[in-house]
Amino acid sequence: MVVDDHQSIRKLCTTVGNSVGLDCKEAESAEAALAQLETVSPDLVLADLMMANMSGLDFLQEIKRILPHTEIAIMTGHGSIETAVKAMKLGAYDYITKPFRIEEFKLLLGRMEEKVRLVTENQFLRERMNTEMDLSGIVGSSAKIEDVLRLVARLKDTRTPVLIGGESGTGKELVARAIHYRGAYANRPFVAVDCGSLVPTLIESELFGYEKGAFTGAVKSKEGLFQSAHGGTIFLDEIGELPLEMQAKLLRVLQEKEVRPVGSNHRVKVDVRVIAATNRDLEAAYKEGKFRKDLFFRLNVVTIHLPALRERRSDIPILVQYFLNKFAPKKNMDVGQAAVNVMLAYEWPGNVRELENCIERAVALGTHNLIDVHDLPPALQNHSGGTLSETKLEHSELSGTDLEELERATIQRVFEETNGDKELTRRMLGISRATLYRKLKRYNIGQRLKSAEAAMSAP
C-alpha cells in the first residue's frame, strides 16, 4: 500500500511495485489508508513522512498497532539522521529519500518482501514444530492404536471427509492434526472449531463471516473460519452440538463449496477438507431426529474410532513414561508399583487427558523422585473398583499383575517388530532415546533378541 498525498508519487510507486509482482493499493492520506484496513491487510506499506492531519510517524505507530507484522518504509523529501532514527525506533523497516532512483526503490521493496517472507516462514515452521511435538501425544503400541495410526497414514494425502468418534479426552484433535500435518497439505491452514463452545446467536457469523453493518457491533467486515481454512482443513470438534438450523446451513456449504457471509448477497468459494469429531452416537442421534441424516452421511465418509483408555490398558505404562518425560524432563522420576496398580485398575472416565493431568499433578506435588499412591488425585486414591488382577487387558497382551512385566513385554514386542531399530522403537513408544536405552538395559531386551537369533541360526 502506497500512502502519499501526491498522485504522481503514488502512480510511480504502484507502477514499480506491479513490475516486480506486487499487488498494489493506493491511499491519498493516512485516514484513507486506515479506512482501507477494514478490508485489506497489506504486507508492505510505503508512507510519506509529511502528510496533512496525521504525520507519517503517527501513521507508522497506528499501523504497527493494527498490523504488527506489516513492514513499513517512510518516504521523505526532508531526510535526516534524526528522522531515520526515530522512524526505526517506532518500528519502520527503513526510509527512502525523495526523489529516489527506480533501482534503489526496487531493492528496498525486495528487502522488505524478503523479510516478510522469512518472518511468515519462521512462524509457520514454529507452529509446525509445535504441532509435530503435539503429534507425539498419540502414544501407544496396542492393536487399537496401531489401527488408528494406519488409518491416519492412508488419509493424510487425501481430501476425504473424516468423522472421528470417541469419548472426551481420547485425543480426537490430535488425530485430526496428524491427518493434516503429516500429509501433503501440511503447509495449508488448519482451523479448529469447538462447536460446543460457540454462542448460538453468533455461530453463523463465526463460521461464515459477516459484512460491515450486518448487525450491531459489526464495525468492519470479517472473514469466517471456513474462509480462514481455505485450501486446508477445518476441524469441527463436537459437531453433534450444532443446532439443527445450523446443521442445514453447514450441509449447504459442504455441498456447494461456498459460504455467504452474514449481511452479504454474494457467495464466496471455499475449498476445505472437513474433519469432524464427536463424543456422541450420531447414528442414534439422527434416528431420534436430533441430527440431520443427510449431514451425517455427508460427514461419515471415513470413520475413525478412538478407543477409551480402559480399552487399551496395556498402553498405560508407556503413556505414564511419556508424560513423565514431558513434565519432568530433567528428573529421573518413576512410579511406584502400588501407584501403577491403582492406575491400571482405574476406569479413567476422562481417558488420556485425565491420565495426563494425573501425572502433571503428581510431578508438581510430589516431593520425591518416586510417585506413590498418595501423590495421585483423590479420585484414584479412593478408587475401589477391584485389583489389578481383575482388570481386562487385551487378548494379545500379557495379563500379569506386575508393571515391570507388562512394560517389558510391550517394549520387547515393539523392539522385535522393528527388528531392533532403536530409533523406530523409540518413536513408536513415544519415549526419549535415553529412556529407551535405560529400559532395554534394565530388561536385557537387546541381548534376549540376539540370543534368540543365535539359537534360530544354530544347526
Image (tube, rainbow, N blue to C red):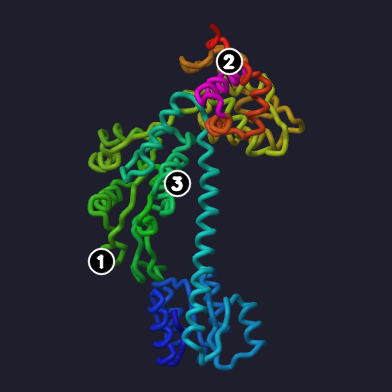
Q: Residue at the front extreme?
A: 459
First in sequence: mark 3 or mark 1?
3
Residue 153 versus residue 337 in the image, above or below: below
Q: Are the residues tagged 2 and 3 within 8 Å (C-beta)?
A: no
Residue 388 marker: 2
* The magenta stretch spans residue 285: no
Left or right: residue 29 versus residue 162 is: right
How would you rate the neighbour count of disc 3 (Cα within 10 Å): few for under 14, some for 14-19, many for 20 or more?
many
Residue position for label 1: 266
Q: Nearer the viewer, residue 249 or 186?
A: 186
* Amino acid found under the numbered disc labelled 3: Tyr
Residue 408 location, quadrant = top right
* Amino acid found under the numbered disc labelled 1: His
> Percent position (x, y) of residue 303?
34, 35
What whole-number distance in Å separates the C-alpha atoms at marks 3 and 1?
Answer: 32 Å
- The residue shown at (55%, 34%) is 427
> Percent position (x, y) of residue 434?
66, 33
